[in-house]
Amino acid sequence: QKEVEQNSGPLSVPEGAIASLNCTYSDRVSQSFFWYRQYSGKSPELIMSIYSNGDKEDGRFTAQLNKASQYVSLLIRDSQPSDSATYLCAVFMNRDDKIIFGKGTRLHILP
Amino acid sequence: GAGVSQTPSNKVTEKGKYVELRCDPISGHTALYWYRQSLGQGPEFLIYFQGTGAADDSGLPNDRFFAVRPEGSVSTLKIQRTERGDSAVYLCASSHREGGELFFGEGSRLTVL
């Protein structure tokens, strides 16, 4: 099993709908989780971090964490064309003390 | 500047040459990471510094790659005898603490001809 897994997509979502992005990870003792957005030709930019089980909301974004299932997700409400990008899930691997990224999910918001 | 600075932004070199890529992290950030990203892939971990020491260099592909951070601030990634397969965007990121949120520079795009 890869350390951080994401569906590569592309995920196509109509404008105004909810986009749901998923990520699973292998290290059971991981404590820190991050979502980054990356536009083509640009570097990753932090959207949210989450450390505790449950939901964390920031504007149109909600991160969800389930440590028992080793699963973290990102919901984007009221999707906009400007949300079209690659979304990267990152996990701080406590066993190795390093942050590992998934391959990313390409999201396409349809106008 | 306030953000992570990487130089050069673009580097074209010939196979077999030596290359240095520089990263200047956000002031006060003790953690510094190097990643490599190829087209369509996520950032691939190379090396992590906490202060001056390399806390984890397990991601360096082979002994042609080496990185230093002598004063706990600026870091240099060094690649010897470059190969075409080394072509990628090299990303540097820093954080105020181990396991904390990473902030990325704009990357150094390396092309080996």
Image (cartoon, coloured by chain):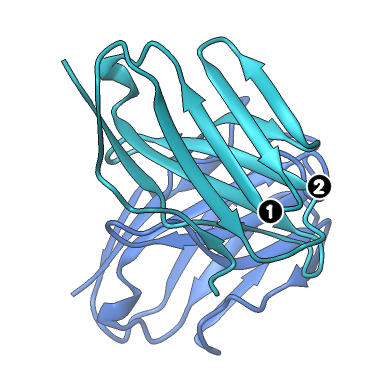
Chain colours: A cyan, B blue
Q: Nearer the viewer, mark 2 or mark 1?
A: 1
User: Do badges 2 and 1 share one subunit?
Assistant: no
SS at badge 2: loop
Q: Residue at x 37, y 46 (%)?
A: A105
Q: In the rendered image of this protein, does residue B50 appear above or below residue A56?
A: below
Q: Amino acid at mark 2?
A: Thr
The residue carrying mark 1 is A69
Disc 1 crowd rating (10 Å Cα; few below 14, some 14-19, many 20+) is: few
Q: Quadrant of the N terminus of chain A?
A: bottom right
- Drawn side of residue A11 relative to residue A78, left or right: left
- B92 vs A56, nearest the viewer: A56
Tell whether A97 sits left or right of A33.
Answer: right
Q: Residue at x 82, y 50 (%)?
A: B98
Instruction: Give the quarter of the image for residue B36.
Output: bottom left
Front-most of residues A89 and A64: A64
Q: Quadrant of residue A17?
A: top left
Whether residue A75 is visible, yes or no, is yes
